[in-house]
Image (cartoon, rainbow, N blue to C red):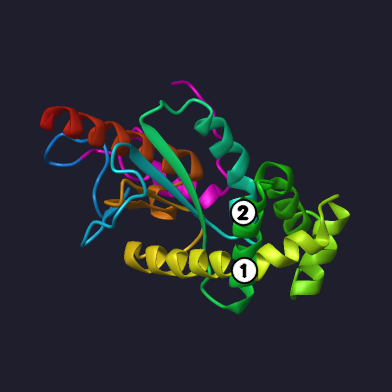
């Protein structure tokens, strides 16, 4: 797989290069190319995945996060080349009332089947156009501006199903120990975040962990 990712933060590049003289990770004692506790973090207790027959890759994100906004095109490019045995799942964080408001946008869009139509637009509205989307009315105004049915979206936005999804999101994010956004959770076992050194290396580390999980599953069959 050959994909070029642009680093967003110069300081992260410096940290990555500082790991060894040639800028590559020195690896762990078992020969794995990336180091637990630095490049990724093993979860104290594995968390359940949605489809145990596949290797799950979770993106924890927030629509109002500029780093998530910048990460999204690279993740989309990476996801386009993922094999069938990998299941990409997006989980919006709901750490507080403000983030929860935006998490509800994602889940309401899923209910209505319009995620592809509005996902990038919501990111752009908050990060490029500087819309705060601070309350439900502001959210509904945006949805209407995007050509979607305001009434149907409001119904889904306030539905029991979306509320249940928010509860599940909170539980998953807490169990994984997510500390910022964007972060990646690999197969309910590993968390990959900014300590990997850059957004490019986040995806590189996640990909290596996915392959390690695939080899493990193959050996058990």
Q: Quadrant of residue 72?
A: top right
Residue 25, placed above or below residue 108: above
The residue that appears at 62% across and 54% down in the rendered structure is 111
Mark 1 or mark 2: name the one nearer the start of the chain. 2
- Closer-to-camera residue (97/68): 97
- Closer-to-camera residue (184/35): 184
Q: Secondary structure at mark 2?
A: helix
Q: Quadrant of the N terminus?
A: top left
Image check: 219 left or right of 56? Answer: left
Q: Decide whether residue 184 is among the magenta residues.
A: no
Range of the magenta residues? 1-27
Residue 101, placed above or below residue 142: below
> Horizontal and vertical percent for residue 136?
75, 73
Residue at the outermost top position = 2
Q: Which residue position holds label 2?
A: 111
Q: Which residue position holds label 1?
A: 159
Residue 155, placed above or below residue 185: below
Distance between the Cα atoms at labels 1 and 2?
A: 10 Å
Image check: 150 left or right of 105? Answer: right
């Amino acid at each position: 797989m050959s994909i070029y990712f642009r680093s967003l933060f110069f300081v992260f590049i410096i940290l990555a290069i500082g790991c060894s003289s040639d800028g590559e990770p020195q690896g762990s004692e078992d020969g794995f190319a990336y180091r637990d506790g630095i490049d990724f973090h093993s979860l104290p207790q594995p968390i359940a995945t949605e489809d145990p027959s596949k290797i799950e890759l979770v993106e924890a994100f927030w629509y109002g996060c500029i780093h998530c906004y910048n990460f999204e095109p690279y993740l989309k490019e990476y996801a386009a080349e993922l094999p069938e045995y990998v299941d990409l799942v997006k989980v919006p964080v709901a750490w507080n009332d403000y983030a929860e408001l935006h998490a509800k946008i994602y889940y309401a869009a899923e209910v209505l089947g319009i995620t592809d139509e509005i996902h990038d637009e919501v990111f752009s509205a908050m990060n490029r156009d500087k819309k705060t989307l601070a309350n439900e009315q502001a959210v509904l105004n945006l949805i209407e501006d995007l050509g979607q049915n305001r009434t149907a979206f409001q119904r889904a936005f306030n539905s029991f199903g979306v509320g249940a999804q928010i509860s599940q999101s909170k539980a998953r994010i807490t169990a994984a120990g997510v500390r910022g956004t964007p972060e990646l959770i690999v197969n309910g076992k590993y968390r990959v975040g900014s300590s990997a050194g850059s957004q490019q290396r986040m995806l590189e580390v996640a990909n290596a962990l996915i392959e390690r999980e695939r080899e493990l599953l193959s050996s058990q069959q």
